[in-house]
Structures are given as structure tokens and as C-alpha cells.
């Protein structure tokens, strides 16, 4: 097989990432985070774009170095066009356009969500890949969707959040408790020593396969407000149980809809993707469902769960095979209109 080298660039939020793929095998995947946002308890768009400008060249250089290839061996450059923070995206898009123009090679635009889904097709030791059609739960700080994936580039969204994303629910409830950003890992860490059934929070009753997390956040906020009136140390005394309980509530909502989607469609190939797909409780509940409902389950490795350029590279590889290229007029989009 001919070797096709694709350089992938991801800059949709606060991680600057570059990866090199040879066909479907990742040769390097470099990610530079941005600690500056921890002070603010969330991503500050202007600071994020400035950090991307500082990180993009060193990250790409290291990705090429780690892959042990010369820039002239690259067949095409794939980049995240959107959705995401516009200022952050513009850094990656501008660099990709300039680098492709300088090298005289094709430019490939990739949708961020599409990248998360196609990360399941990166070469792995078990050669374990989803078969079309499969269901995918895309769950992150900005997205919560269930989609039927019909082929590499065709998907049908059958359920999505009507307000906040699951990842945002993790971040906001963590912030209410005074936990450090990002909230998901902080809650998961404290939840390890907590009782997931210690506290109950109101869960939304949303018809069909759609999600809602704003009511859950409000319920959590009011619960803490009421208890802090009688005990100002309530959060500190019950931190582990609070984290375990809110995590259990979020994961239960996700799993109930995912199982419902499987039953309605008859599809038993189930995948998860996005930053929240790294959550251990979600993994455990998915594996329980695998046995109970006879599902074929696909969970991405941790390095491909959060935002990274490897997922952009694999999407770029499949597009390269189809000669699905874009031109130098391409611009970033913060939110894709369906």
C-alpha cells in the first residue's frame, strides 16, 4: 500500500494539537494545553487564541519530528474548520492554509465532531472498529448528541441537547463547588471516594432522544444553597458524595437515552466520543449495558477522547482518498448550521 502522510491540526478550543498519520496509523500526536484558563474557571477566548499563536509552530515542528518525517513528505494538511471558538479556529485555519500553499499540497477541512467520531478508525492493536451503521454518543463540553453513523462522512443526528451540553454541566457544577477547571476530571477524581446515591437531583423529562442539563444544574445549585444556609461547610463535608451523585445523575441521563436509541433503531453497534467519553463511570455503565443488551461497544483510547489532532488526521486521510479537498478561500465557522 502506498504511504499517505497527512498532517492534522486541531485548534477549536484551548488545546493546540498537531498529528501525523500514515494511512490509518498515527505516527505522532502532540498536544499543548493552556493552564492560564484555570485561574478564570473556564476558557477565555481571547487568551486561548493568543496561546494558539504562540504554540502552533512548536507543536507542528514536534509532530513532524516525532513522526520522523520531513515536511516535504506530507501529502496533505487537514485542519479543524469548526465548530469551536472562532479566534482559536482562525489560528489553525490560517496556519494550515499558509503551510499547504508553501508546500504546494492539498488542503482538507474537517468538522470537529466528524473528527471525534472517526477517531474510532485509527489503527489499534485489536483491529476493533465499528461497522456501519453504528450509533455514536458525542459528548463534550460543547456537544451532546446521538447520531447514526452511516458511513465515514454521512451521519444523521437523532437526539441532541436542547440547552446545555453534558460537559458544561460537569464544569458548572464543579465551579459551584469551588473545584478547579476543568470540572469533569475534578468531579471524577472526588467521586471515586463518594456515594453516587447519597443525594438525588431532579432529572429532566424530555421526550424522544433529546437531552437537557440546565434543569439538573439548577437543581444542584438550589440544593447547595438550601443546605449552606444551615451548614456553611456543607460542600466541604460532603464533597465526595456530591461529586459522585452529580456524576451519577449526568451519566444516567446519557445512558438512558443511548439505550433508548439502540432499542428504537435496532442498532447494537455503539460508540462514544468527545471529551466526556473519557469518564470512567460512563465506561463502566456502557460495559454493563454491553452485557445486558448484547451490544458491540467501542470506547476510544484516552489520548483520542479529548481534543486532539489525531482525530483530524484520520478524517483527513479518508477525505484524501476521496480527493475531497478545499481551497484557499476557506474560512472557519464557530457553529455549523444544519
Image: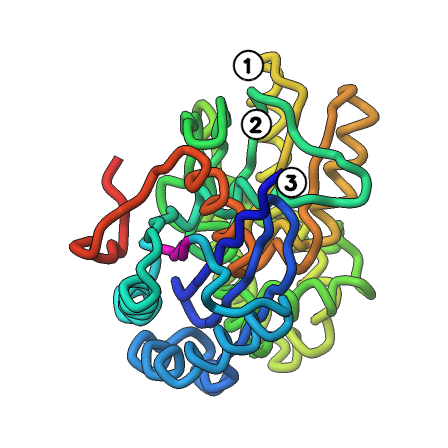
Residue for point 45% across, 50% down: 165
Q: Which residues are magenta?
A: 76-80
Q: Is residue 8 left or right of residue 201?
A: left
Pair 3/2: label in front: 2
The quarter of the picture where residue 63 lies is bottom right
Q: Are marks 1 and 2 in contact (CB under 8 Å)?
A: yes
Tell me the residue that label 1 is attached to: 265
Q: In the image shown, does 288 or 19 lie closer to the viewer?
A: 19
**Lower sequence index among marks 3 and 2:** 2
Q: Is residue 11 magenta?
A: no
Q: In the image shown, does 286 or 257 lie closer to the viewer?
A: 286
**Lower sequence index among marks 1 and 3:** 3
Tell me the residue that label 3 is attached to: 252
| Residue 85 in view here | no
Q: Give the vertical position of 52 relative to 126 (above or below).
A: below
Rendering coords of residue 318 (x, y %): 48, 38
Q: Give the vertical position of 77 relative to 39 (above or below).
A: above
**Lower sequence index among marks 1 and 2:** 2
State the SS at label 1: helix
Rendering coords of residue 173 (x, y %): 53, 64
Quadrant that contains the N terminus: top right
Amino acid at each position: 500500500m502506498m504511504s499517505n502522510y497527512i498532517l492534522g491540526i486541531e485548534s477549536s478550543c484551548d488545546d493546540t494539537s498537531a498529528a501525523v498519520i500514515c494511512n490509518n496509523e498515527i505516527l505522532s500526536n502532540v498536544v499543548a494545553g493552556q493552564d492560564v484558563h484555570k485561574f478564570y474557571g473556564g476558557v477565555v477566548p481571547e487568551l486561548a487564541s493568543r496561546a494558539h499563536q504562540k504554540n502552533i509552530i512548536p507543536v507542528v515542528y514536534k509532530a513532524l519530528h516525532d513522526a520522523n518525517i520531513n515536511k516535504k513528505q506530507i501529502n496533505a494538511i487537514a485542519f479543524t474548520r469548526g465548530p469551536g471558538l472562532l479566534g482559536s479556529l482562525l489560528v489553525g485555519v490560517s496556519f494550515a492554509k499558509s503551510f499547504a500553499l508553501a508546500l504546494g499540497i492539498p488542503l482538507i477541512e474537517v468538522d470537529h465532531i466528524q473528527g471525534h467520531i472517526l477517531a474510532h478508525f485509527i489503527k489499534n492493536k485489536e483491529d476493533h472498529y465499528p461497522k456501519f451503521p453504528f450509533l455514536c454518543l458525542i459528548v463534550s463540553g460543547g456537544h451532546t448528541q446521538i447520531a447514526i453513523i452511516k458511513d465515514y462522512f454521512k451521519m444523521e443526528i437523532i437526539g441532541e441537547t436542547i440547552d446545555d451540553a453534558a460537559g458544561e454541566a460537569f464544569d458548572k457544577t464543579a465551579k459551584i463547588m469551588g473545584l478547579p477547571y476543568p470540572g469533569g476530571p475534578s468531579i471524577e477524581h472526588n467521586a471515586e471516594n463518594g456515594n453516587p446515591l447519597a443525594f438525588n437531583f431532579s432529572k429532566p423529562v424530555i421526550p424522544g432522544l433529546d437531552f437537557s442539563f440546565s434543569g439538573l444544574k439548577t437543581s444542584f445549585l438550589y440544593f447547595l444553597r438550601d443546605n449552606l444556609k444551615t451548614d456553611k461547610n456543607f460542600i466541604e463535608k460532603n464533597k465526595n458524595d456530591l461529586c459522585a451523585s452529580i456524576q451519577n445523575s449526568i451519566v444516567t441521563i446519557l445512558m438512558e437515552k443511548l439505550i433508548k436509541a439502540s432499542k428504537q433503531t435496532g442498532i447494537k453497534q455503539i460508540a462514544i466520543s468527545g471529551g466526556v467519553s473519557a469518564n470512567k463511570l460512563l465506561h463502566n455503565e456502557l460495559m454493563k449495558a454491553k452485557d445486558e443488551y448484547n451490544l458491540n461497544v467501542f470506547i476510544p483510547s484516552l489520548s483520542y477522547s479529548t481534543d486532539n489532532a489525531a482525530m483530524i488526521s484520520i478524517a483527513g486521510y479518508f477525505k484524501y482518498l476521496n480527493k475531497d479537498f478545499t481551497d484557499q478561500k476557506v474560512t472557519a465557522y464557530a457553529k455549523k448550521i444544519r
